[in-house]
Image (cartoon, rainbow, N blue to C red):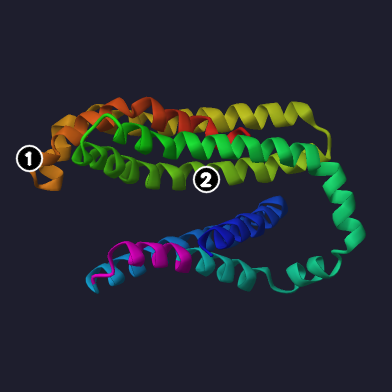
Amino acid sequence: VALLGAGAKALFSGWFVRKGDLTAVSRATITQSVSNVGVSLGTGYLGMAALGLILAYVVASWAGIVTLVRNAGKTFRESLARVTRHSLIVAARRHGPNATWSTLVAVVNALSMNAPVLVLALFYLPYEIGWYALMHRMVSAPTGALSSALGQSFWSQASEHARARDIRAMKEIYRKTTFRLAIACIPVIAACLAAPLYIGPLLGMAEWGGAGYVLLAMTPLFVGSLMFSPTNH
């Protein structure tokens, strides 16, 4: 149910990005984040543990969809009315190869982000895996929100240039967006490199001091995911 909701939200978001209406996408993202945090804290207070986290993810996904549908209004319903069996077949033939390769790349990206936990579990103790999981969670959330916002802005403009076959303009917006992402990486790099100095005191437990060195080692991962992922398939 959660994956269905996340996939549907991605499809709805793509429709808004293609239109260049990023306000609705921003509202949906904020609603989704607030829902996730709120339900997570609430179910945690009730002692629901893992079930509460799963429920929070499900609720957040569908809260984002509801927000997008509410902001779409009449134009979205009119677009859906124009969808026919023939138009779906034409779209599948036109975009099938690209969609296939994009799906394969997405699978590899998902594995590259989640497989390390399983691999590390073979060689390290559970609390050390906890260091990795917590640091990944702490940094990937804000960097993911930033890269997603800049990426959506890039794809909105890129789709216009693509329809006009203006390849030179696409190259220029790609360079500008990559430069902005590189600038955004500077505070991320500084925070990661200084992590051994503040992670332990920040979490209030000496046992978590080692997590700072884990975050330090993860610097290339976050730089790559922030600087290149938003503008590349």
Does the rendering let one see residue 162? yes
Span of residues in magenta: 47-59
Front position among marks 1 and 2: 1
Left or right side of 35 for 193: left
Q: Residues within 10 Å of mark 2 (few under 14, many from 20)?
A: some
Left or right side of 23 for 56: left
Image point (64%, 36%), residue name:
104
Indicate the quadrant where residue 221 lies. Answer: top left
Does the rendering let one see residue 37? no
Image point (35%, 62%), residue name:
53
Cβ atoms at labels 1 and 2 below 8 Å apart: no
Left or right side of 44 for 147: right
Counting from the top left corner in percent of width and height, residue 128 is at: 21, 36
Q: Residue furthest right?
A: 86
Residue of label 1: 206
Residue of label 2: 148
Does the magenta segment cover residue 52?
Answer: yes
**Which residue occupies the foreground of this view, 10 or 114?**
114
**Which residue occupies the foreground of this view, 124 or 178?**
124
Image point (33%, 40%), residue name:
136
Q: Residue furthest left?
A: 206
User: Disc 1 or 2, which lies upstream in sequence?
Assistant: 2
Q: Amino acid at mark 2?
A: Ser
Indicate the quadrant where residue 3 lies. Answer: bottom right
Counting from the top left corner in percent of width and height, residue 6 is at: 55, 58
Q: In which quadrant will I find the N terminus?
A: bottom right
Q: Amino acid at mark 1?
A: Ala
Q: Residue furthest front?
A: 122
54, above or below 73, in the image: above
Q: Secondary structure at mark 1?
A: helix
**Which residue occupies the foreground of this view, 74 or 41?**
41
Q: In which quadrant will I find the C terminus?
A: top right
